[in-house]
Amino acid sequence: MSHRGTHSDLHSEQGALAGEHPGRAANPVIKVHDIAWLEFQKPDLAKSQIFAHAFGFTTTLQTADELHLRGSDASAPCVIIRKGLRETYLGAAFTAADASDVLRLAGATGSHAGKLPEALGGIGVALRDPSGALVRVVADTHVLPALPAQAPHTHNAGHDVVRTNVMQRPPREPANVQRLGHVVLQSTKYVETLNWYLEHLGLIVSDFKYFDGQRDRGPTMSFIRCDRGRTPTDHHTLAMTLGPRNRYVHSAYQVADLDALAAGGEYLLDHGYHRSWGIGRHIEGSQIFDYWRDPDGFLVEHFTDGDMFDCTLEPGWSPMTASGLAQWGPPATNDFLGISPSRESLRELTSMVSALRADNEFDLARLRGLLKVASS
């Protein structure tokens, strides 16, 4: 299949140079269709549910040991939280085209495919990526019927008047989450882990980022989408970045429009929750975004108006900078960048020493590149 040149604009200066990473595997085992859900462990499910409802989720299952949360789209739950002693990201599930792909992947990896719990239905195979994160690939799961969704507002754009004698009054209420959009992970074995996802799940790269002055050493971040041929998919379903430890960075959930996002943000502020960064519009993916900390410190994002790409676009390449994270909006905060005083930033700092001593892709030059990002 031939591919069109890179998406070129003000921010992605060019595509790959000769010999650089192609951004896709030549012959992947399967090609997943989408991300299905994320799995977390948290000690207080009641507290998690209160925030989830304020953020815009709906509960589909609640027991003493497990909480399932969904958006309004017809789908499986998009977040599963299990009760445990400490706050932990467990992993992600991806939807296969059909059950035969689950079996094919299980056979190729020497793994066992089996039935999922009755609350989810279908079959799945559980794998571990090179960074140790759980990766499920599932098929034939129960599809929960769609719920009533927030309707996008009707806008008078410039002189194009489509709303007359009707006032605009977005209610200050939770933004109705429609679906899970993507998850961002950090890895000490970035290239190895990236290649694993491309080869096993058939994902393809939309954009590569590299540390300033280190392009010759290869990329250090990638925004990765599903390959569904000519059917457009989210600019990124998974994003990965190189860092001193393996960890969850954030996850993102689609809402109807800017009014839903902004009014939902006011609702969260009214209820005492912490905005990490926003509102703004990203560069890679173009989403309008708003980032929040949940009560356990996990970073979660509301987004709307994201880019959709088909299989024909090749990766863009650009340097990784803090100022390059958004087209407009407030500067990226220290909290979002992970450098404000906190338990997580202390763990990140202390892990830098151990990472430099370990057998991985994070070395002294990469550390210097990472430290430059926050001030660039």
Image: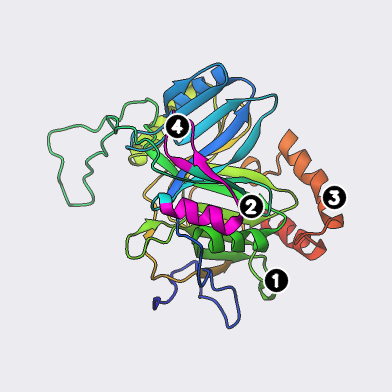
Q: Is disc 1 placed on a helix, strand or loop? A: loop
- Residue 319 screen position, x and y as percent: 60, 66
* Residue 214 disc label: 1
In the figure, 208 relative to 263: above or below? Answer: below
- Residue 163 screen position, x and y as percent: 15, 40
> Which is nearer the N-term, disc 2 or disc 4?
2
Q: State the extent of the magenta-drawn residues as a range.
A: 100-123
* Residue 129 disc label: 2
Q: What amino acid is found at the position of numbered circle 3 in the picture?
A: Ser
* Residue at image location 67% in from the left, 62% down from the top: 192
Quarter assignment of residue 59: top left
The residue carrying pointer 1 sits among few (fewer than 14), some (14 to 19) or many (20 or more) residues within 10 Å by Cα, namely some
Q: What amino acid is found at the position of numbered circle 1 in the picture?
A: Gln
Instruction: Between residue 259 and residue 120, name the one nearer to us.
Output: 120
Instruction: Between residue 262 and residue 344, name the one nearer to us.
Output: 344
Q: What amino acid is found at the position of numbered circle 2 in the picture?
A: Asp
In which quadrant of the rendered image does the C terminus lie? bottom right
> Which is nearer the N-term, disc 1 or disc 2?
2
Q: Which residue is mark 3?
A: 354
The residue carrying pointer 2 sits among few (fewer than 14), some (14 to 19) or many (20 or more) residues within 10 Å by Cα, namely some
